[in-house]
Amino acid sequence: PSGFNESLIFTLDGTGEIESSLTAIGNKNLIKEIGTSLIPTSLGALYLIITVFLGLKSLGDEYKVMGLASYGDPKIYRNVFERLVILTENGQYQTPFLSKNESKEFLIENLGNPRGANDKFEQRHADIAAALQESLNLAVLHTLKYYRDKTQLTNLAMAGGVALNCTMNGVIARSGLFKNIFIQPAASDEGCSAGAALYAYYNSNGLTDG
């Protein structure tokens, strides 16, 4: 649906089948996978966990965390999130605490007690959200810059629930990495039906290699 003849494709979600993100090259009607992040590594899952930690609902209130982040100072908890999201070679990142039993204890020890659903919001909560958003922005730019340099593609198409994070998308747009950016409007699970229909159409008409 992007209208691009050729594009870097980046999908980013909490979980897929075994992946949480996938990078590919789209060329006309063909898609060639060139990179993945495998579960339990997941920026989307981390965002969900912090959403719940802040006393909000998972799979629905993440946008509130994104908005809350604009009122916070990421420097306050930056060192904590640098341990939660570790940038590695070849545009990759790791979220090591998501696979550890002591992840809850780590968050409480370093961020304080979780906010109850009926508790008032404090500055601390906004600072946590700001550090989370900053870590997401940095990790995604880390990946996109690597694959932009590797492929020399100037178009970007994104999907997956995390692709609806407007703050992150603004950071990508302002980075100047890409001339054109397309965000699939049905970027989360409901987009699977549209993707399946498009794949069936192109495949049944002999417009792909299957």
Image (cartoon, rainbow, N blue to C red):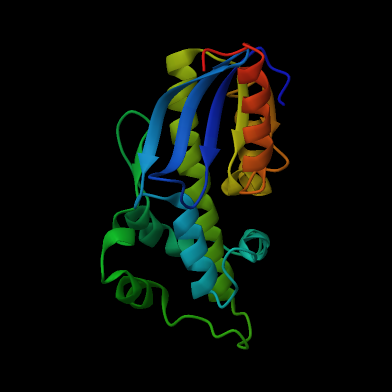
The spot of residue 39 in percent (x, y) is 36, 49
**Image quarter of residue 198:** top right
Q: Taking the image as drawn, is residue 74 in sight?
A: no
**135 above or below 172?**
below
On screen, residue 34 versus residue 196, left or right, reads left
Residue 198 in view of the camera: yes
| 198 vs 186: above or below | above
Please report the residue visible at 55 percent of the width from the left and 27 percent of the height from the top.
9
Residue at 46% from the left image edge and 40% from the top image edge: 21
How many numbered marks appear?
0
Q: Which residue reaches farthest bottom?
A: 118
Between residues 69 and 28, which one lies in front from this camera angle?
A: 28
x, y percent for residue 180:
69, 22
Residue 16 x/y as whole percent: 46, 46
Instruction: Quadrant for residue 1, please give it.
Output: top right
Residue 25 located left or right of residue 99 = right
| 43 over 174 or under it: above or below | below
Name the residue furthest left: 101
Front residue (pair 164, 91): 164
Is 42 or 187 nearer to us in this picture? Answer: 187
Q: Position of residue 73 (x, y in %)?
A: 55, 62
